[in-house]
Image: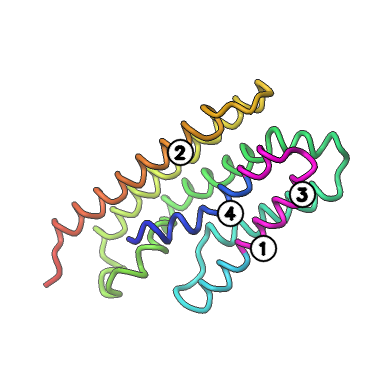
Amino acid sequence: MKSSNLVLGLLPWILFSFVTRQMGAGTVGWAALGACLICLVLTIRAACSDGLTTIDVVGVVTFGSLAATGLLGSDHIRHLLADYGRAGAAYLLAAVMLVSVLTVPFTEQYARVSVDRRYWKNPAFRSVNRRISLLWSAVVLGAALCHTLAGALGTNTLLLNWLLPALLGFLALRQTKAIAHRAGAAHPEP
């Protein structure tokens, strides 16, 4: 699996968190609209080439809803979204990732781009992607918990908003590569 495709799929979620936290409540609706448009572009791009990804489609709906709420809501609503919107979006993303483990692992949608079609129905391929999807759902849940704590504390803590989530993401990328490498070594192509 190309980690760069996975990171690209998560980019709107990261950008929304960054803009909202750094620029405040007045920008939350616009940040969500920007993230929605990025997700829409990624969805259209994927539909034209590799196929739709769950993360992009969920992003369009999530950020579209947040944009409408942020742009049409009161100042109080915007402040709540600035404090807890990124956590809420992350909880939703973690839940979608976790549910995908029980159906079609979301990472499988990214892995299919670089894996020969004949392996897609292989139970080992599905198993590897279940492990990777479970890993990422745990990482995103950890980031959501960090964002929730930062919102509750009412501070823009570098540690909770960026350092811990970034560290979790970095470790997950390394682990993703290791899992995929072990799977490739265990099942070499004929």
Chief SS of the magenta region: helix
Looking at the image, do the residues carrying marks 1 and 4 touch, with CB atoms under 8 Å apart? Answer: no
Disc 4 marks a residue whose amino acid type is: Pro
Disc 2 marks a residue whose amino acid type is: Ala
Q: Is residue 27 above or below residue 61?
A: above
In the image, taking residue 97 as reference, residue 78 lies left or right, namely right
Query: Quick check: is 38 in the magenta stretch?
Result: yes
Q: From the image, tell me which residue sits under label 1.
A: 37
Depth check: give the residue in front, 82 or 123: 82
Query: In the drawing, what numbered circle is on residue 12?
Result: 4
Q: From the image, tell me which residue sits under label 3.
A: 29
- The region drawn magenta spans 17-39
In the image, taking residue 75 as reference, residue 133 lies left or right, namely left
Label 4 to label 3, Cα distance in Å?
14 Å
Residue 187 place in picture, x, y as percent: 15, 61
Residue 171: quarter of image: top left
Label 1 to label 2, Cα distance in Å?
24 Å
Q: From the image, tell me which residue sits under label 2.
A: 166
| Mark positioned earlier in the residue sequence (1 or 4) | 4
Disc 3 marks a residue whose amino acid type is: Gly
| Mark positioned earlier in the residue sequence (2 or 4) | 4
Disc 1 marks a residue whose amino acid type is: Leu
Tell me the crowding category of disc 4: few under 14, some 14 to 19, or many 20 or more residues within 10 angstroms, Cα based: many
Tell me the crowding category of disc 2: few under 14, some 14 to 19, or many 20 or more residues within 10 angstroms, Cα based: some
Residue 6: quarter of image: bottom left
